[in-house]
Each structure stands twice: as C-alpha cells, then as structure tokens.
Image (tube, rainbow, N blue to C red):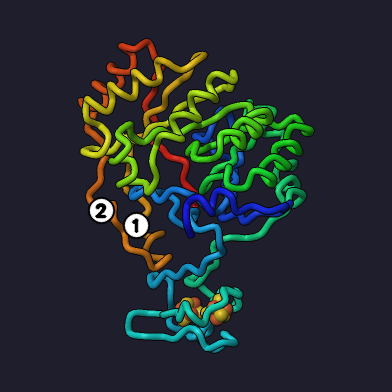
Amino acid sequence: MAKTNMMADESHRCSGIVFDIKRYAINDGPGIRTTIFLKGCPLNCVWCHNPEGQSPEVQKMYSAAKCISCRQCVYSCPLEACSLTPKGIVTDKASCTVCGICAENCPTKATELSGLSLTVENIMAILEKEIIFFDQSGGGVTFSGGEPLMFPQFLNMLLDACGEKGIHRTLDTTGFAKTEILLDVAKRVDLFLYDIKMMDASKHRQYTGVDNSLILHNLKVLSQSGANIRIRIPLIKGINDDQRNIDETARFISTLAGEVRVELLQYHCIAKHKHQKLGQEYNSNGMIAPDAERSNQIIAAFQAYGIPVELNFSQVESSS
Ligand code: SF4
Ligand code: SF4
C-alpha cells in the first residue's frame, strides 16, 4: 500500500486493530504504564522491533519452533489453505482469508493471529483496571505502534476517554503524519515520545522508506505549540552514530522551542524471531549499538548543546 494512501486511509471508525497490550511497562514514559500497540505504520525501518506493527491488517504468524506437527491447523482450515511440509506449516496466502480458525485450533500457539479489533470501550475497560497503579506511580497510558497517528479519529476518541478518567496520556510517534492531524491530536497528549532516526534525507529514505522532511517539520511545529516532548533516538553503529549525524541532530534539537529532553536508545537486535514468524526476510542482521566509549561521546555531544540527555537500554517493544 502506498505511504500516502496509508496516511489518508482512515474513515470514521471507533475501533482499531491492536497487536499488543503491555501492562506494567516502565520504559514507555513516566511511572507504571499500559502500552497499547496500534497496528499499521507508514515507515518500514530496517531495524524495526515491532514488524508485526507495520501492516494495518490482521496477519497470521507461525513459529516452527513451537509446532508439534499435529496438523490440527490443516484439518480445521475450511479453505485448505495450509499444509504441513518438511519445513513446517506453509500457508497459501492467495487462498487464506486470515479467519483465524487454524490459530484457534493450534494447541501450542505455533500458529497465531497478530491483531485484534478493539473498540474504545474495550480498551478503556482494560485501562480503568490499572488506574490505581497509574495514580500511585505517576504513570498512565502510552499509545504506540506502528504509528498511532495513522488512525487519528480512533486515537482522539481514546485520548479523550482517557482524559475524562484523568489518565496521563503519552504518544509514541514517528511524527510522519499530516501536520494538522498531529496538532489536533497534540491537544489531548500530555507527553510525546518523538523519534528521530537520522538527519540525512536520502539515508532516512533508504533505511525507513520515507523522507524525513515532514518528520522534522512536524517536530519543529509541535515544539512551537508548547507540547511536552521527549525525543528518542535509536543508536545503531555505522548507521546513525557518526559525528556528523550526531552534530546535525543536536544542532536541530537545540533550535526547537521549549525544553526538549533526549533519550538515546541502545539498539539491540531482538526482532529476528518476529520477522521469521511473519515469514519476512530479516535485514538487520549484524546491526549493533555503539560501544560504551562511543555512546559517552554521543552523550557529551548533546550536552555540549545544552540538551538534557539520557541513555536507555530498552526500546518500546511489543511482547509478541
Ligand atoms: S487463517 Fe483461516 S483461511 Fe487462513 S489458513 Fe487459517 S483457517 Fe485457513
Ligand atoms: S496446529 Fe499448531 S502445532 Fe499443530 S501443526 Fe498446526 S501450527 Fe503446528
């Protein structure tokens, strides 16, 4: 699906496809949080930790390591779309309607569906049970993905409902959305976790599939609107840890309005099994974080611009 179509795709909806809900999250904003992962993203980052969040559709996932070759999925499929082969279960994607019957019948969860349609009411029922933990810890809800801004109407309804309950609202975003959508959503958000991957536009396109000019423009406008922003930068050796990129990033951040904090995320390669479960090629083999010495130099580079910065060893990752 074209990126621009994905951005404009949402019609009136009060439900969305959620691919994970992580309770007791402590790295997705302040305090103890519940992170809701919405399915669908206009970016296609090579190092993505949540590849099951890229497609806005419900998807079938299969883990050969969990499969006991019982054939329950094969017997239960009304369309004869899956078969057992020496390499495990193979699904004929042209025939499969992703109905989920095979997943329901799989005794080991080797076959699963990623993505569940939930309404605002469904999600609020989950969040309301956690309010006591949010209140005691200064936490709240974090909407992540994927890219939640792909579904502004659903997101705004969720944010409004959380606001009515006094739940602190964090939005984890790539910033790749129409500026007017971002600013409208921003009226309902208490904290943004806003990603910057790299400053070079062609490199950004190469590694994420999209240009970064809209992302940087939106960040500037968002900071001018008075939004509370924490910028998150995944640090990947040889991709974005070079001095030129770090200096350009720090210089850009230093021009933003208000106090903007930076969180550097040490990259770790943990999503290989998810790509395998989706039957996708894994392209970030060998990507690692910079070593401690380089990370300290990068921290110092941001501090030289007067930017508050911290190093975080975890990422906003679903538990799929
Ligand atoms: S999801 Fe439905 S159609 Fe697809 S393989 Fe499973 S049972 Fe068959
Ligand atoms: S039902 Fe599950 S465990 Fe059995 S063959 Fe299918 S995928 Fe494997």
State the residue position of label 2.
Answer: 285
Which residue is drawn at the image coordinates 67% and 28% (left, top)? 187
Please tell me how many numbered marks the rendered image carries: 2
**Res. 295 in view:** yes
Asked whether, in this view, residue 70 is left or right of residue 310, the answer is right
The image quadrant of residue 148 is top right
Q: Does any atom of ligand 2 lie closer than 8 Å to the CB of label 1?
A: no
Q: Which residue is mark 1?
A: 272
Spot occupied by residue 85 in the image (x, y as percentages of width and height): 37, 85
- Residue visible at 71% across and 42% down in the picture: 158
Q: Amino acid at mark 2?
A: Asn
Mark 2: few/some/many CA within 10 Å (<14, 14-19, 20+)? few
Residue 150 screen position, x and y as percent: 57, 47
- Give residue 21's position: percent from left, percent from top: 59, 49
Vertical arrangement, residue 73 with respect to residue 149, above or below: below
Q: Mark 1 and mark 2 in contact? Answer it, CB < 8 Å.
A: yes
- Kindly identify which numbered label has been placed on residue 61: none
Q: Secondary structure at mark 1?
A: helix
**Secondary element at image label 2:** loop
Q: CA distance from mark 1 to mark 2?
A: 8 Å
Q: Is residue 102 visible?
A: no
Closer to the camera, 84 or 207? 207
